[in-house]
Image: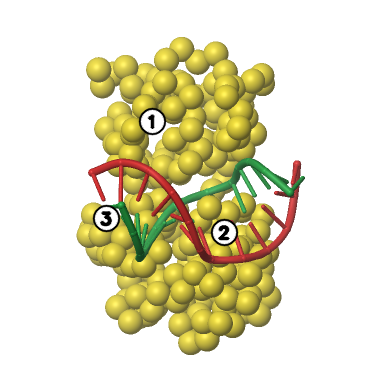
Chain colours: A yellow, B green, C red
DNA sequence: GACCAGGCACATC
DNA sequence: GATGTGCATGGT
């Protein structure tokens, strides 16, 4: 049972890697930028997130302490291109408030915390759900946690590896119970699923088409 | 103009 | 517990 999934998950990874090559994720210069991007990209095209982050960088605002002091409405105006800018400004403020007031504004000060404990804390913040929390844990804090997103779900669904009812946790467990818990592997795997999703697994499409590397996958 | 994009929170039944 | 809705920009 377990070895079946281990085999198929490995095969998917192998095909994706051969087709797309290394993805070099997360596209950010610092761990803090990863956190900001993780919140800004919620249900939003990454290109729009880049514009928002560029607005902050251009003004040297991309640091926990600076954002902590920046008025929320001003932050909202700057991240406007990322969409949902008012709620996302509130979420970013809540995140940096947590980081500054509990950890001196330094992500490096989270290094002693257990992953599970950290995940619970992140999830307790407003606007940080499972995917955002896990993106921060994996890509900013380098914890071996698998990130599940809409593409992951869609791809697994399309190949019959999960059912419509599968929730976030169930899909995450599929990976984490059938693969080695390695940061580099999870980093690359999630990035590859996103790459594949963007190219070949868009919402309206009902099945894979050539040259999707998974099109004739035996599942 | 419709549909989509690397979600999440909250109201209502 | 399940389902529906608001949040909003920019690309195809």
Secondary element at tag 3? helix
Task: Determine the residue positioned at 23% across, 54% down.
Answer: A116
A122 lies above or below A15: below
Measure the alpha-carbon separation of dots 3 and 1.
29 Å
Left or right of A36? Residue A198 is right
Give the quarter of the figure containing the C terminus of chain A: top left
Are labels 2 and 3 assigned to the same chain? yes
State which tag comes first along the sequence, 1 or 2. Answer: 2
- The subunit carrying tag 3 is A
A54 lies above or below A214: below
Label 3 belongs to which residue? A115
Label 1 belongs to which residue? A164
Secondary element at tag 2? loop
Measure the alpha-carbon separation of dots 1 and 2.
33 Å
Are labels 1 and 2 assigned to the same chain? yes
Measure the alpha-carbon separation of dots 2 and 3.
22 Å
Q: Position of residue A64 (x, y in %)?
A: 46, 77
Task: Determine the residue positioned at 30% across, 78% down.
Answer: A102
A98 lies above or below A31: below
State which tag comes first along the sequence, 3 or 1. Answer: 3
Secondary element at tag 1? loop
Q: Position of residue A6 (x, y in %)?
A: 33, 23
Left or right of A170? Residue A69 is right
Label 1, residues with CA under 10 Å away: few <14, some 14-19, many ≥20: few
Label 2 belongs to which residue? A28
Residue A99 or residue A23, whichever sits in front = A99
């Amino acid at each position: 049972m377990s070895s079946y999934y281990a085999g198929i998950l490995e095969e998917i990874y192998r095909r994706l890697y051969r087709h797309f090559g290394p993805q070099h994720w997360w596209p950010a210069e610092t761990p803090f930028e990863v956190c900001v991007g993780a919140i800004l990209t919620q249900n939003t095209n990454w290109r729009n997130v880049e514009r928002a982050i560029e607005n902050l960088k251009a003004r040297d605002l991309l640091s926990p302490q600076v954002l902590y002091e920046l008025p929320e409405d001003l932050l909202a105006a700057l991240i406007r291109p990322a969409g949902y800018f008012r709620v996302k400004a509130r979420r970013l403020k809540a995140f940096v408030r947590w980081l500054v007031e509990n950890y001196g504004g330094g992500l490096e000060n989270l290094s002693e915390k257990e992953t599970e404990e950290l995940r619970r804390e992140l999830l307790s913040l407003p606007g940080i759900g499972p995917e955002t929390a896990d993106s921060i844990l994996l890509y900013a804090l380098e914890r071996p946690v698998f990130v599940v997103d809409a593409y992951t779900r869609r791809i697994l669904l399309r190949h019959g590896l999960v059912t419509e009812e599968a929730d976030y946790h169930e899909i995450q467990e599929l990976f984490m119970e059938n693969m080695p818990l390695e940061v580099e592997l999870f980093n690359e795997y999630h990035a590859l699923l996103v790459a594949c999703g963007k190219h070949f697994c868009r919402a309206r499409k009902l099945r894979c088409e050539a040259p999707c590397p998974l099109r004739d996958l035996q599942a």
